[in-house]
Image (cartoon, grey):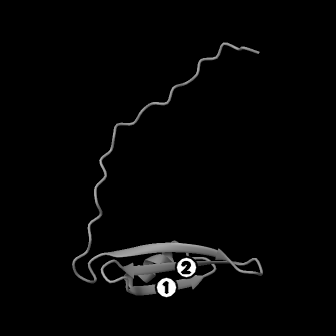
């Protein structure tokens, strides 16, 4: 139909410099926290909270439940 519409150009973002991640030198200095989600065969969903030491990849805590509200996550982090 040859409509006279202007095409919008994408704005370029300034180049960002990638910084390498810091590695922990001793155990119990930094931890990683990850949430996982899966569905069971009967259709129920389950979630897990994993807390891992970054130095030796030792698992501190795995919490599995149908739902993980923020109050429960805070309790696990304080524990």
Q: Indicate left or right for 62 with 78 as reference.
A: right
Near-viewer residue (61 or 27): 27
x%, y% of residue 46? 64, 79
Q: What element carries label 1?
A: strand
Task: Say how many tags the image has.
Answer: 2
Q: Name the residue under label 1.
A: 62
Q: What element carries label 2?
A: strand
Which quarter of the rendered picture does the N terminus lie within? top right
At 49% from the left and 30% from the top, the residue drawn is: 10
| Image-quadrant location for residue 12 | top left
x%, y% of residue 36? 55, 74
At 30% from the left and 75% from the top, the residue drawn is: 30
- With respect to residue 3, does 25 lie above or below? below
x%, y% of residue 35? 52, 73
Sequence-wise, the earlier of marks 1 and 2 is 2
| Image-quadrant location for residue 54 | bottom left
x%, y% of residue 52? 40, 80
- With respect to residue 6, does 30 lie above or below? below
Near-viewer residue (6 or 77): 6
| Image-quadrant location for residue 77 | bottom left
At 29% from the left and 47% from the top, the residue drawn is: 17
Q: Name the residue under label 2.
A: 48
Which quarter of the rendered picture does the C terminus lie within? bottom left
Tags 1 and 2 touching, CB below 8 Å: yes
The single residue placed furthest to the left in the displayed view is: 25
Label 1 crowd (10 A; few <14 / some 14-19 / many >=20): few
Near-viewer residue (60 or 56): 56
Q: Indicate left or right for 29 with 65 as reference.
A: left
Label 2 crowd (10 A; few <14 / some 14-19 / many >=20): some
Alpha-carbon distance for marks 1 and 2?
7 Å
At 22% from the left and 77% from the top, the residue drawn is: 25
């Amino acid at each position: 139909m040859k409509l006279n519409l202007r095409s919008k150009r994408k704005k370029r973002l300034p180049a960002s410099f990638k910084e390498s991640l810091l590695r922990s030198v001793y155990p119990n200095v930094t931890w990683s926290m990850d949430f996982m989600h899966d569905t069971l065969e009967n259709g129920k969903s389950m979630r897990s909270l994993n807390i891992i030491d970054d130095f030796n990849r030792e698992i501190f805590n795995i919490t599995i439940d149908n739902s993980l509200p923020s109050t429960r996550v805070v309790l696990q982090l304080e524990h």
